[in-house]
Amino acid sequence: MLIYAGIDEAGYGPMLGPLCVACSAFVIPNHDPEQGKIDLWHQLRGAVCRKKSDKKHRLAIDDSKNLKGAKKGKAHPLLNLERGVLSFLAQGNELSPCDDDVFRMLGTSLPEEPWYESSTDLPVANQPDQLRIASARLHLSMTDEGIVLGYSGCEMIDVASFNEQVEQSGTKAAVNFTAAMRHVDRIWKQWPDAHPRVLIDRHGGRTHYRELLQFAFPEAFIRIVAEEPSISRYVLQHGDSSLTISFLTEAEKKHLPVALASMIAKYMRELAMIRMNRHFQGLQPQLEPTAGYVQDARRYLADLKPVLEACRVDRRCLVRSC
């Protein structure tokens, strides 16, 4: 049996909105990890593909940066992200009618800020009937292959917590890494006897992770398998239980669980931003929404200045320190 997991983030660089770190883990009973890498795009090719536009109307599963549409495009920007994420989360069951349900399914805790209070009806970018068809098709393909999405989760770290954690740890990279390790811990505890394989998209030029892993898992013995420009791989051993974790470049292009994690993280962040924009547009109806990235965030904050002052909004809860 193979436990095949991927972790990725969305919202690492913006000035506004949360950092979301997501994970997806697949249980593949009929695959021996010693046989090498499995290609879930190939295994589930009857229901999924990498392309946004597919003649067979399969689900596009890829790096979220490749799937989010243009703001002024013909289709809703979240069309493909939402279609893929909700289809996997439904697993053949009824689709969630509200974003509160999706946050709950993923273990995502929304910050207690007024701009996150209102909920959003789902889907926001797709027709419910078409989503049901896509979800049912995916469920049939996964059932035929004996593949199960055994874990899916998303940590949402909003601005106040983000700023506090950066102040304590010194870098936003440490905040991102710590959230990823919490996912790893959950996976290891859920399948302690199955030797899970976890893939994480690498950021920056770091190739050495042993000390960071030892800090996260102080009771584990950690063996370095590889520390190369394209991949760093480690085996963690605690008693009779093992876990292999790999940090690699462009992981979302090579491993479907990482691509799905990327999509989940991005979709959760987008749902959070929908709530935030709705709140402030209610206070200032002419306000143009923002995705939270630095240049446009500055415009957004300048336009909102009278409202923020009148409502006495603490900028440390709204604007990131780095």
Image: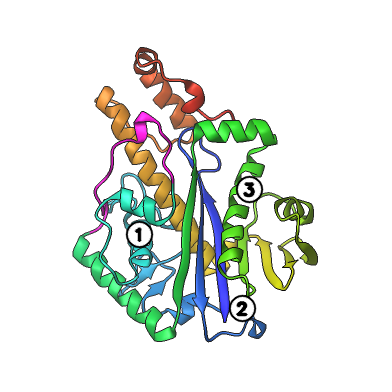
What is the spatial separation of the Cα atoms under label 1 and label 3, in whole angstroms?
29 Å
**In the image, is 12 to the left or to the right of 70?**
right
Looking at the picture, how far across and down is residue 200, in whole percent? 61, 60
- Confirm whether the magenta stretch covers residue 121: yes
Kindly identify the amino acid type of the residue bearing the numbered disc 2: Lys
Looking at the picture, how far across and down is residue 167, in whole percent? 65, 30
| Residue placed under numbered mark 2 in the picture | 37
Q: Give me the residue at 60% from left, 46% from top.
A: 176
* Badge 2 density bin: few <14, some 14–19, many ≥20, Cα 10 Å: few
Looking at the picture, how far across and down is residue 131, in whole percent? 26, 65
* Badge 3 density bin: few <14, some 14–19, many ≥20, Cα 10 Å: some
On residue 178, the disc is: 3
Q: Quadrant of the N terminus?
A: bottom right
Question: What SS does tag 1 mark?
Answer: helix
Instruction: Tell me which corner region of the image, top left, top right, bottom left or bottom right, holds residue 130.
Output: bottom left
Which is in the foreground here, disc 1 or disc 3?
3
Instruction: Tell me which corner region of the image, top left, top right, bottom left or bottom right, holds residue 149.
Output: bottom left
Which is in the foreground here, disc 1 or disc 2?
2
| Residue placed under numbered mark 1 in the picture | 80
Question: What SS does tag 3 mark?
Answer: helix
User: What residue range appears in magenta?
Assistant: 109-126
What is the spatial separation of the Cα atoms under label 3 and label 2, in whole angstroms?
26 Å
Looking at the picture, how far across and down is residue 54, in whole percent? 34, 71
Q: Give me the residue at 42% from left, 20% from top.
A: 313
Kindly identify the amino acid type of the residue bearing the numbered disc 1: Asn
Return the residue nearer the eye: 59 or 141: 141
Label pair 3/2, CB-CB below 8 angstroms: no
Label pair 1/2, CB-CB below 8 angstroms: no
